[in-house]
Image (spheres, grey):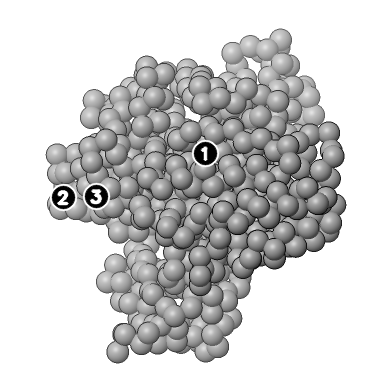
């Protein structure tokens, strides 16, 4: 870096000093903390986004959100030029600059990194960054800090895209770098037109019964509800009612939203006994997660949860069916032996019953640690890779090779057997590839795909839920002294440190039929998470409580007695 560049960073960073005692880590999905301590972090991530853009000579994104966290928290993360998460190779640098104690030290760190990565300031393109934020009140001032960070790199430009869902920003970055149009309207148009295309390919246009026709969506009092209202106007075939859109005065993620519904397994605020029989869905605060549920008739707070595992199962089933239709053809065609590799990716949170179901379908199931950055990377190894976390975060990835094959196949079938079942299957797969957000998990595009598949199959939410029966499970949080003291292995199923805790967990697990339990440090909140499942709910609850006690004894404040 030349002296001019160094002094620019030095001067601007003095405006954003690191608060005393703050230590942050890039975590599962970027930096997250109480919003009041985040300005310096967001400023520095602005610099990082610009450096990443220079290094890749492509557009990058910066999103200000803390997703499912409470409203006073906020966070920041980077969208890489692919539209995916920041490359993991840069995370240690992100940690280092976020925690750098002084402006002088920060400049030195950046200078060393620029040399190591051979980042050129005189390349063909200057840095270009798209900025977005969710609806959190702290977002506006943090966005200003991000801009100042970007402008600390000579020639860098930042475009404020306004209030967006996190997946919209990722989608825009991906689209722009592919040379496509990438406004918010383009996003809505792509989703709505590919949805209509998929619905038009529904055999016999199976009609659902009246009650099932309506979808009620809990917007978590976040950005998703507002965006869904816009999207809804472009879909004439669907009746969607949005609740908890944030306009009614509710608090973001408080007693509402996908994280609450999935973890607590209760109805969100604004849903009642009168909703029994209606198909309901819940988004999280920045609309990158989606779960479905229906209200149970026996108790207004009970739900039948249709979580990310069941969304994954529905998608996998549908895609497998389309691939089977393609295989039925007998005529000569392009690359007759082409066999698409279909794989599914889950985490340790996946309900054991879902994994059994997917394996029974004959699918290849692989596991990674929690965090879409890990699942996405794995899914990209397949022609069609479907990944979902139980919490409702996931998507489908299509390889370029497979998409080209589908295009070629479509052209060929157009001339040989237009309108054949095979051609329809090809067109459905192409429509899915346009509908689903291939940059990152997206509640809005996922919701439309679920709706299109339910229509295709003529299924109610109940039919879908009956694909398999979840093993009862329970999730708990434990506050500990230092969550980084927990080190896990084997996709977070085994604790390596502190010593002996895994042995103690094994003893508890062995007490319950079909028992399974693990602990892991959260990457977004200052807690240890506990997951347990077993053959009956009481056993899952009891196992989760015992393991939470162990976590407290080994790592906590010793409150469990
Ligand atoms: C983020 C990640 C998800 C991950 C979740 C888990 O979700 O994007 O992939 O499942 O964190 O968080 P934790 O590490 O606290 O269990 P989100 O929706 O908050 O961005």
* Residue pictured at 33% horizontal, 77% vertical: 545
- Identify whether 106 is placed above or below 477: above
Badge 1 crowding class, 10 Å Cα cut-off, few under 14, some 14 to 19, many 20 or more, is many
Q: Is residue 178 visible?
A: yes
Does the CB distance between marks 2 and 3 fall below 8 Å?
Answer: yes
Does the CB distance between marks 1 and 2 fall below 8 Å?
Answer: no
Mark 3 vs ligand 1: CB below 8 Å: no
Q: Quadrant of residue 115?
A: bottom right
Badge 2 crowding class, 10 Å Cα cut-off, few under 14, some 14 to 19, many 20 or more, is some
* Disc sitting over residue 267 in the figure: 3
Query: Between residues 186 and 512, which one lies in front from this camera angle?
Result: 186
Label 2's element?
Answer: loop
N-terminal-most mark, 3 or 1: 1
Q: Single out the mark in the foreground, 3 or 1.
A: 1
N-terminal-most mark, 1 or 2: 1
Left or right: 249 with respect to 411?
Answer: left
* Residue pictured at 31% horizontal, 85% vertical: 560
* Residue at mark 1: 132
Label 3's element?
Answer: loop
* Residue pictured at 37% horizontal, 78% vertical: 548
- Residue 376 location in percent, x, y? 62, 49
């Amino acid at each position: 870096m030349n002296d001019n560049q160094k002094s620019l960073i030095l001067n601007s960073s003095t405006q954003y000093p690191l608060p005393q005692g703050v230590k942050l880590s890039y975590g599962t999905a970027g930096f997250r903390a109480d919003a009041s301590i985040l300005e310096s972090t967001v400023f520095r991530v602005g610099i990082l986004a610009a450096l990443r853009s220079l290094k890749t000579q492509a557009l990058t994104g910066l999103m200000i959100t803390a997703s499912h966290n409470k409203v006073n928290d906020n966070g920041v993360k980077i969208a890489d030029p692919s539209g995916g998460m920041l490359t993991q190779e840069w995370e240690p640098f992100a940690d280092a600059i976020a925690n750098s104690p002084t402006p002088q030290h920060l400049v030195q760190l950046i200078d060393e990194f620029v040399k190591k990565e051979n980042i050129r300031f005189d390349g063909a393109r200057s840095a270009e960054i798209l900025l977005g934020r969710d609806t959190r009140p702290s977002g506006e001032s943090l966005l200003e800090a991000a801009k100042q960070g970007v402008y600390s790199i000579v020639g860098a430009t930042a475009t404020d895209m306004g209030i967006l869902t996190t997946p919209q920003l990722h989608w825009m970055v991906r689209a722009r770098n592919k040379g496509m149009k990438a406004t918010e309207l383009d996003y809505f148009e792509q989703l709505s037109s590919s949805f209509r295309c998929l619905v038009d390919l529904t055999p016999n246009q199976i009609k659902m019964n009246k009650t099932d026709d309506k979808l009620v969506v809990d917007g978590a009092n976040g950005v998703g509800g507002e965006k869904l209202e816009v999207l809804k106007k472009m879909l004439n075939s669907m009746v969607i009612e949005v609740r908890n859109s944030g306009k009614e005065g509710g608090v973001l993620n408080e007693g509402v939203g996908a994280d609450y519904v999935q973890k607590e397994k209760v109805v969100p605020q604004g849903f009642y006994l009168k909703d029994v029989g209606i198909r309901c869905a819940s988004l999280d605060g920045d609309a990158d997660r989606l779960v479905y549920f229906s209200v149970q008739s026996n108790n207004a707070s009970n739900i039948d949860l249709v979580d990310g595992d069941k969304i994954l199962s529905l998608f996998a089933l549908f895609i497998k069916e389309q691939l089977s239709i393609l295989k039925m053809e007998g005529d000569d065609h392009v690359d007759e032996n082409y066999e698409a590799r279909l794989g599914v990716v889950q985490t340790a949170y996946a309900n054991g019953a879902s994994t059994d179901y997917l394996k029974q379908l004959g699918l290849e199931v692989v596991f990674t640690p929690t965090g879409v950055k890990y699942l996405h990377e794995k899914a990209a190894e397949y022609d069609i890779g479907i990944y979902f976390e139980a919490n409702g975060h996931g998507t489908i990835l299509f390889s370029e090779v497979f998409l080209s094959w589908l295009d070629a196949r479509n052209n060929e079938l157009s001339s040989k057997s237009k309108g054949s079942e095979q051609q329809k299957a090809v067109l459905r797969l192409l429509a899915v590839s346009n509908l689903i957000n291939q940059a990152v998990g997206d509640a809005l595009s996922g919701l439309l795909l679920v709706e299109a598949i339910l229509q295709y199959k003529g299924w109610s939410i109940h039919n879908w839920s009956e694909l398999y029966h979840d093993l009862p499970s329970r999730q708990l949080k434990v506050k500990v002294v230092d969550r980084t003291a927990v080190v896990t292995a084997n996709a977070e199923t085994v604790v390596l440190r502190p010593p002996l805790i895994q042995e103690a967990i094994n003893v508890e697990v062995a007490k319950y039929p079909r028992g399974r339990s693990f602990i892991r440090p959260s990457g977004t909140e200052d807690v240890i998470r506990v997951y347990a499942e077993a053959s009956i709910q009481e056993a899952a609850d009891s196992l989760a409580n015992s393991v939470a006690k162990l976590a407290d004894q080994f790592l906590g404040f010793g409150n469990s007695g």
